Amino acid sequence: MSKQAFVALVTCFNEDETINYAATRAQVRRQVEAGNSIMCAGTNGDFTALTFEEKVRLTEEVVDEVGGRVRVIVNAGMPATFETLKLAREFDRIGVDGIAVITPFFIACTQDGLVRHFSTVADAVTTPVYLYDIPARTQNHIEPDTARLLAGHGNIAGIKDSGGAKETLEAYLTVARDVEGFEVYSGPDHLVLWSLQNGAAGCISGLGNAMPEVLSGILKAYNAGDNAEAERQQATFTAFRTDLYALGFAPAMVKRALYLQDASVGASRQPALLPNAEQDGRIAEILTRYGLL
């Protein structure tokens, strides 16, 4: 089975910080044309800044624009199980391909609490549920043993690992090898090819917003068995990541890089990082160096 790349799609905003759905649809088309599937309302999509109603409409717009050409996963995760459940049921109704559930944030959870949280959501929908681990942002980490326990749930299909540690990714991949039907999607952009080579079903990339063809190129080359080309594309992706992320908070740098390519994506809602002329100049230099501007 071919491995898949998902892009954690940005949400586009107008100058008054309302969502620019037309521009967001344009970004969907750009990614689909490059060969990438879509994850919406994730970290790179400013999900914490969106209202309940906006997340529902955003998902409807993305699913409509995709038109079944690629897969769509949407993040329903919120601090409370109650709201996560309400969102997941809406996404289930819309008809996405997967519902990602980020670990609760602000609320400190035990591992037992995480099992209850994810199981409650997975019990309530028919759409496959994907665990979403990003402890640097949520302060709650899905331990590998917890992932193994949840992998036995009939409607939990896998996990997105955005922890950044190869050791944790390896532990999740061990679970995937042991539990049939449980998939691992890697989040760290420098580990895309490594994760594929070690059994991941694919990746979910934020950086792919700014470099969609290279991300797609890694997957296409790997699926075709062209390891040399896959390594070449990964080297470019990793170098771009290193240069861009050295300038600041990764999602903000991706959004700003994309803005310099296409101003219709807008800035992010406040209190996100404000544009800075000096920083924009450095981002533009990087984009030019990689032939993206």
Image (cartoon, helix red, strand yellow):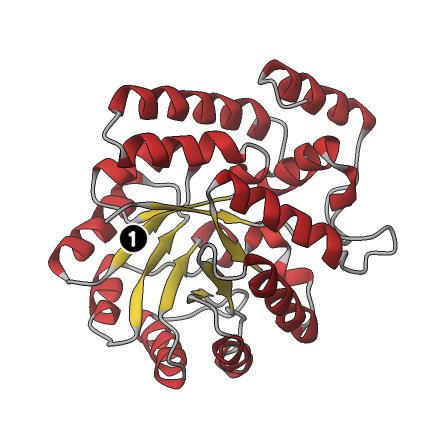
Q: Where's residue 188, x and y in %?
A: 41, 40
Residue extending farthest right: 16
Q: Is residue 218 left or right of residue 8?
A: left
**Badge 1: residue crowd in 10 Å (few <14, some 14–19, many ≥20):** many
- 97 and 160: which is toward the camera: 97
Q: What residue is drawn where x is 41% and y is 48%?
A: 162
Q: Where's residue 13, x and y in %?
A: 77, 53
Q: Is residue 265 left or right of residue 99?
A: right
Q: Is residue 180 visible?
A: yes
The image quarter containing residue 176 is: bottom left
Q: Secondary structure at mark 1?
A: strand
- The answer to whether 233 is drawn above or below residue 191 in the figure is above
Q: Is residue 12 visible?
A: no
Q: Where's residue 117, x and y in %?
A: 39, 77
Q: Where's residue 251, x and y in %?
A: 60, 43
- The answer to whether 244 is drawn above or below residue 119 in the figure is above
- The answer to whether 150 is drawn above or below residue 198 in the figure is below
Q: What residue is drawn where x is 66% and y is 54%?
A: 25
Tally of numbered discs: 1
Indicate the amino acid at tag 1: Val
Q: What residue is drawn where x is 47% and y is 29%?
A: 214
> Disc 1 designates what residue?
184
Q: What residue is drawn where x is 67% and y is 32%?
A: 257
Q: Is residue 229 left or right of residue 266?
A: left
Residue extending farthest left: 178
Q: Is residue 197 left or right of residue 6?
A: left
- The answer to whether 239 is drawn above or below residue 50 in the figure is above
